[in-house]
Image (cartoon, rainbow, N blue to C red):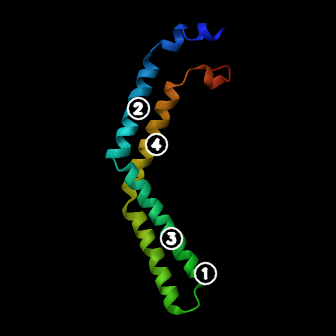
């Protein structure tokens, strides 16, 4: 198939139920990233992971009891932040799952079997 025929091919312009459902799922996933706390959950867990790593690094290099107490407190605070913001993580995972499923539905069928060519 020549390149000019590819753009006139009917299946490239067709909106069937899979593409419409994929577009709806992608829209819900993007909406969920902003309103279900997906982005807030990402940055919260990023901050808590950095704090947990920093506390562990201080724990390993601690030579006094005060340094061990402070690094332990940092690790406990990071774990508590992760635990209390679990609903944001679940919202982020749900949004990412909707985005992925919508993307899978929007792709042409030939991409699944390796016969699709751009």
Spot the residue most to the front: 4
Is 14 displayed left or right of 109 in the figure?
Answer: left
Q: Are marks 1 and 3 in contact (CB under 8 Å)?
A: no
CA gap between label 3 and label 2 equals 34 Å
Pick whichever, 9 or 49, lies toward us.
9
Q: Mark 1 or mark 3: which comes first in sequence?
A: 3
At label 1, counting other C-alpha atoms closer than 10 Å, the crowd grade (few under 14, some 14-19, many 20 or more) is: few
Residue behind mark 4: 96
At label 3, counting other C-alpha atoms closer than 10 Å, the crowd grade (few under 14, some 14-19, many 20 or more) is: many
> Residue at position x 56%, y 81% from top?
59
Residue behind mark 2: 25
CA gap between label 2 and label 1 equals 45 Å
Q: Classify residue 35 by image quadrant.
A: top left
Q: Are marks 3 and 2 in contact (CB under 8 Å)?
A: no
Residue behind mark 1: 60
**Residue 110: x, y in percent?**
62, 20
> Residue at position x 43%, y 64% from top?
82
Pick whichever, 43 or 65, lies toward us.
43
Quadrant housing the N terminus: top right
Badge 4 marks a residue whose secondary structure is: helix
Residue behind mark 3: 52
């Amino acid at each position: 198939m020549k390149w000019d025929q590819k753009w006139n091919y009917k299946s490239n312009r067709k909106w069937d139920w899979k593409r419409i459902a994929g577009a709806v799922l992608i829209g819900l996933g993007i909406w969920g990233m902003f309103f279900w706390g997906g982005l807030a959950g990402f940055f919260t867990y990023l901050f808590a992971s950095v704090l947990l790593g920093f506390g562990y690094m201080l724990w390993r290099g601690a030579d006094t009891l005060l340094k061990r107490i402070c690094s332990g407190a940092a690790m406990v605070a990071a774990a508590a932040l992760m635990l209390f913001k679990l609903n944001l993580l679940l919202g982020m995972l749900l949004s990412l799952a909707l985005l992925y499923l919508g993307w899978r539905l929007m792709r042409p069928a030939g991409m699944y079997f390796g016969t699709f060519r751009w």
